Image (spheres, helix red, strand yellow):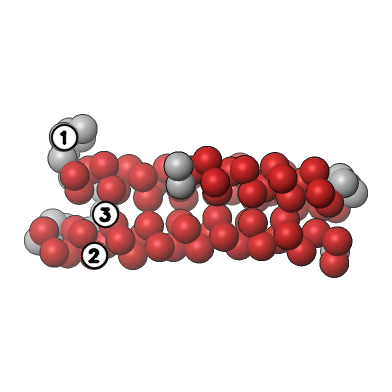
Amino acid sequence: MEAYWSSILGVLALCLISVALAIYSGASKGFAGALSGPVIPADEDNRLYRIDRVHMNSVEALAPFVVPAMLAMIVGVRPNALAALVWAHPAYSTW
């Protein structure tokens, strides 16, 4: 697994991005006096709704991304190719 340290860091970065978005979403709702949870009306112009959706999308995409990445490490995919694919996802998701 030492060969996959870059891929593991990429997966960790994606997890940390999701945690940071959770904190940002919760803080934004708290400052606005909104209730926690997905109770914000679905309005694309509402900033709180957009922040909440970004957070929820990151959480929903986490498992379908991490599981195949870990399976690729177990199967023995080339470390450099896997690292490039793993780091492309956080780079694209924060774009």
Residue 31: where, in percent of width, then height?
A: 13, 64
Placement of 33 over or under 56, stated as above or below = below
Q: Are marks 1 and 2 in contact (CB under 8 Å)?
A: no
Residue at 63 percent of width and 56 percent of height? 11
Q: Which one is in front in this view, the residue at disc 3 or the one at disc 1?
A: 1
Which residue is denoted by mark 3 in the rendering? 37
Residue 45's disc number:
1
Reading the chain from its start, which is encountered first: label 2 or label 3?
2
Placement of 2 over or under 64, stated as above or below = below
Residue 83's disc number:
none
Residue 95: where, in percent of width, then height?
A: 45, 42
Which residue is denoted by mark 2 in the rendering? 27
Q: In the image shown, does 40 or 8 lie closer to the viewer? A: 8
Q: Are marks 2 and 3 in contact (CB under 8 Å)?
A: no
Q: Please indicate whether residue 42 sits to the left or right of residue 81 in the image.
A: left
Q: Are marks 3 and 1 in contact (CB under 8 Å)?
A: no
